Image (tube, rainbow, N blue to C red):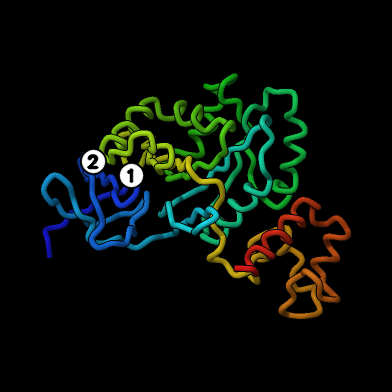
Amino acid sequence: MPDTRRGLVVGTHGRHAVVQDDQGRRHRCHWRGRRSEAVVGDVVDWAASGDEGVIEAVGPRRNLLFRQDEARTKSFAANLDALLVLVAVEPPFSEFLLARALIAAQSAGIPAWVGLNKTDLAGAAAARERLAPYAAMGVETVELSLKAQGEASARVLRERLEGRTTLLLGPSGMGKSTLINLMVPDAQAAVGEISSALNAGRHTTTTTSWYALGPRASDGALIDSPGFQAFGLRHLEAAALATLMPDVSAHLGACRFYNCTHRHEPGCGVREAAEQGLIAPSRWQIYRALFDELADG
């Protein structure tokens, strides 16, 4: 067995990873064997091998999240304390992507909250109305104005980010780069160091990256994965979907059949609740679309 040491995965690209040691030094490593198993946030055992290193083993994970494209589902972040979904007044955000993120977090046991950015713009009231069903089911929404009121937003964010490892999710235009630069002044240097170690070049935008919020591990960190469009949910059973959507699960137990899918069965209490407006129409549409997706496998 080679002489191994403990490290933290702070960046990945292809079959290579950047592993940070206890002294804060970063090392380009590859995986033992053909499979790429480590993701950002993993604690690993690695051994020096010439100018690089070899990841010998991945430590136990508290949780794991997946990303999904048309071809496959792939793990990409582990050992998270929280998930921050950043949306904005403009451009309009996708409620479908928001719902997927919250379902993924719920299934992994990760607390999630929403940051509503650009609340200084005229359309803020409409954005709040779209988020009302999420507030009603207990999802915290924090209002931000990252450009217009940067210092005030930074204070709000520090209260929720310090001491935690938080995955940041947000499509283009929501303000993720502004948030990262506000919270991590040397963010460009950090991602540049990771990119250099990975030799990722122009493909760095698809690289999941770790941003420390301070010099100590206890200060917390932000993880950004800009290259994916949707959380992967294919590891979930369709039958479990209702239990992962709080506004839907609130009406479970009122169905005639114990294995009700809430799609077509008679005597369905969930569908009746939706017809009565107790589940927001947009949320009910999302449940039906996701159920069909998971049922089709």
Question: In the shown orientation, is residue 114 left or right of residue 280?
Answer: left
Q: Measure the alpha-carbon separation of dots 2 and 1.
A: 9 Å
Q: Choose between 171 and 64: the one closer to the eye.
A: 171
Question: In the shown orientation, is residue 144 left or right of residue 218?
Answer: right
x then y, percent, for residue 9: 31, 48
Q: Quadrant of the N terminus?
A: bottom left
Q: Is residue 19 above or below residue 158?
A: below
Residue 198 image label: none
**Residue at horizontal 75 percent and vertical 28 percent from the top:** 123
Q: Choose between 103 and 251: the one closer to the eye.
A: 103
Of the residues shown, which amino acid type is indicated by label 1?
Answer: Val
Within 10 Å of disc 1 (Cα), the crowding (few <14, some 14-19, many 20+) is many
**Residue at horizontal 32 percent and vertical 42 percent from the top:** 217
Q: Do the residues labelled 2 and 1 touch (CB within 8 Å)?
A: yes
**Marker count (numbered):** 2
Q: In which quarter of the image is the C terminus?
A: bottom right
Of the residues shown, which amino acid type is indicated by label 2?
Answer: Arg
Q: Name the residue under label 2.
A: 26
x then y, percent, for residue 89: 68, 31
Mark nearer the N terminus (2 vs 1): 1
x then y, percent, for residue 285: 76, 56
Query: Would you identify the image quadrant in which residue 37 lies?
Result: bottom left
Q: Is residue 203 above or below residue 81?
A: above
Q: Callout 1: helix, strand or loop?
A: strand
Taking the view exactly as shown, the residue that stands out farthest to the top is 148
x then y, percent, for residue 215: 30, 34
Q: Mark 1 points at which residue?
A: 10
Q: Is residue 221 above or below residue 38?
A: above
Taking the view exactly as shown, the residue that stands out farthest to the right is 276
Within 10 Å of disc 2 (Cα), the crowding (few <14, some 14-19, many 20+) is many
Q: Callout 2: helix, strand or loop?
A: strand
